[in-house]
Image: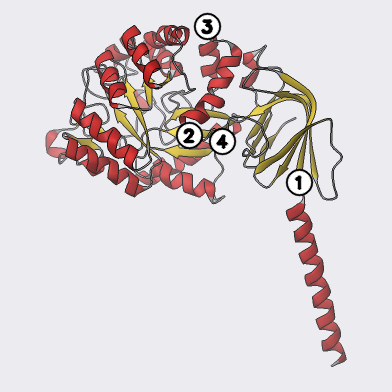
């Protein structure tokens, strides 16, 4: 009896100590001692501040280097420039374009899912803590989004459209280029529509699948095996049906668009963002400004396809002339749109180019005339507004989610420093610390 009683007392003590230890850890905060804190809203730098983080949120931002409480963790960022995690509004995590000679003849959904997980890790390590994935073959990034939330996989916060919605033969029709005997006409559930009723069904299916938003291909595209890269591919009635149904279900909408007419129709229908926007003119810009439509330029994609078009046999025969014509135009369109005051949200179309190189878009944007400060704002504050989460992300303020990165130099003065992100925190968890 003596031993049993003592054993019980011992176990009670162990349980108490364990409970106290867990409680201490739960109550512990993470303190970032920051030498230079960048306000992405105005470009100003605050010197010597402490960011106190509890759980996945920023608790407070105070002047000076606060003294830690017992069990608090201190992270020394006194020599760094700290700013909110970047957000990329146009990626394709489950793919990456390769030359025709290297293209796999068979790609299983399981392979795409594993590829997406690898791409997600690269993207997060590059300082992009949130992305909007626009277009999948199936459920890859919907599943990946959930796996990342559950801590099973490392990657950025994902907002995904699932499968793209296209029209028969349009950019996004998965049967383009296939022998007719090898497929049955794809359905709205599979992402191909030809009427307003089809459009409703396709949007509702994406809601059922768990998508966060809707991506449509309002015009032809560069990399699809189809002749035109710019013709309009939806009727006004189809577009109205898509946008109205998406609004009913609380889904954002994004339109791939190169040609003017397709852009114009999409903007008038109420689309939230235009992707690429190659042949955008003043009329379209004025429409976008009046309706608050965002422009996601993806200059990287245009630059990349223009360069690759110079390599013999890199692209299929139908793709090469489109890459040569459309690719070089995007940067000049971006310069005009920025000067005109169109709202711009950062996006790369990574998956055309390599994942993890997303930072290069900053260089292309600033080379086209955008200020460094506005480029940084486009990847933080403006992207958060486009996603309707500006109360959670885009700035380092009390109550916001703790998505925080650091670089070695002041990016407002030298934008090239974003190539080397040395610290990455997402949701209060440190994923990279090379300080």
Residue labelled with disc 4: 391
Q: Residue furthest left?
A: 181
**How far apart in space, not on screen, are marks 1 and 3 (Cα)?**
41 Å
**How far apart in space, not on screen, are marks 1 and 2 (Cα)?**
28 Å
Count numbered badges in the picture.
4
Estimate how packed mark 3 is, as few (under 14), some (14 to 19) or many (20 or more) residues with alpha carbons within 10 Å. Answer: some
Answer with left or right where residue 309 lies relative to residue 188: right
- Identified at 56% across, 26% down, the residue is 381
Residue labelled with disc 2: 388
Q: Report if residue 311 is visible in the image.
A: no
**How far apart in space, not on screen, are marks 3 and 2 (Cα)?**
27 Å
Sequence-earlier tag: 4 or 1: 1
- Observer-side mark, 3 or 4, equals 4
Residue labelled with disc 1: 29
- Identified at 77% across, 50% down, the residue is 28
- Observer-side mark, 4 or 1, equals 4
User: Could you tell me which quadrant the C terminus lies in?
Assistant: top right
User: Could you tell me which quadrant the N terminus lies in?
Assistant: bottom right
Estimate how packed mark 2 is, as few (under 14), some (14 to 19) or many (20 or more) residues with alpha carbons within 10 Å. Answer: few
Residue at disc 1, secondary structure? loop
- Residue 57 sits in quarter: top right
Residue at disc 4, secondary structure? loop
Q: Are marks 1 and 2 in contact (CB under 8 Å)?
A: no
Sequence-earlier tag: 1 or 2: 1
Q: Are marks 1 and 3 in contact (CB under 8 Å)?
A: no
Residue labelled with disc 3: 369
Q: Are marks 4 and 2 in contact (CB under 8 Å)?
A: no
Where does the image place residue 344, in percent across and percent down from the top left?
Answer: 47, 19
- Identified at 54% across, 51% down, the residue is 150
Q: Report if residue 184 is visible in the image.
A: yes
Where does the image place residue 200, in percent across and percent down from the top left?
Answer: 23, 40
**How far apart in space, not on screen, are marks 3 and 4 (Cα)?**
29 Å
């Amino acid at each position: 009896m003596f031993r049993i009683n003592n054993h019980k007392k011992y176990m009670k003590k162990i349980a108490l100590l364990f409970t106290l230890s867990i409680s201490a850890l739960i109550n512990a905060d993470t303190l970032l001692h920051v030498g230079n804190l960048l306000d992405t809203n105005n470009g100003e730098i605050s010197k010597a501040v402490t960011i106190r983080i509890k759980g996945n949120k920023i608790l407070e931002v105070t002047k000076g280097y606060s003294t830690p409480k017992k069990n608090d963790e201190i992270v020394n960022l006194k020599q760094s420039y700290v700013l909110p995690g970047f957000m990329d509004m146009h990626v394709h995590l489950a793919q990456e374009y390769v030359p025709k000679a290297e293209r796999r003849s068979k790609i299983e959904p399981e392979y795409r899912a594993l590829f997406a997980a690898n791409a997600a890790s690269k993207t997060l390590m590059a300082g992009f803590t949130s992305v909007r994935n626009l277009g999948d073959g199936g459920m890859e990034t919907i599943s990946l989004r959930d796996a990342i939330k559950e801590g099973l996989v490392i990657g950025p916060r994902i907002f995904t459209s699932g499968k793209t919605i296209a029209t028969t033969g349009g950019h996004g029709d998965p049967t383009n280029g296939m022998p007719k005997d090898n497929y049955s006409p794809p359905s709205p559930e599979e992402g191909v529509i030809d009427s307003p009723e089809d459009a409703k069904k396709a949007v509702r299916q994406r809601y059922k699948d768990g998508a966060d938003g809707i991506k449509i291909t309002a015009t032809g595209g560069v990399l699809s095996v189809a002749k035109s890269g710019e013709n309009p591919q939806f009727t006004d009635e189809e577009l109205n049906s898509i946008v109205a149904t998406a609004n009913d279900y609380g889904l954002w909408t994004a339109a791939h668009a190169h040609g003017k007419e397709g852009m114009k129709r999409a903007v008038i229908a109420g689309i939230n963002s235009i992707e690429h926007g190659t042949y955008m003119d003043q009329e379209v810009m004025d429409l976008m400004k009046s309706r608050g439509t965002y422009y996601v330029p993806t200059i990287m994609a245009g630059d990349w396809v223009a360069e690759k078009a110079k390599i013999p046999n890199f692209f299929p025969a139908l793709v090469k002339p489109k890459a040569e014509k459309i690719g070089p135009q995007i940067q000049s369109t971006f310069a005009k749109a920025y000067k005109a005051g169109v709202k711009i949200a950062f996006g790369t179309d990574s998956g055309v180019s390599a994942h993890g190189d997303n930072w290069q878009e900053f260089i292309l944007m600033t080379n086209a005339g955008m200020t460094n400060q506005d480029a940084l704002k486009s990847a933080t504050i403006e992207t958060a507004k486009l996603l309707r989460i500006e109360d959670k992300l885009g700035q380092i303020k009390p109550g916001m989610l703790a998505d925080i990165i650091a670089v070695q130099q002041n990016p407002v003065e030298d934008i090239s420093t974003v190539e080397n992100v040395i610290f990455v925190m997402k949701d209060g968890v440190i994923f990279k610390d090379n300080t």
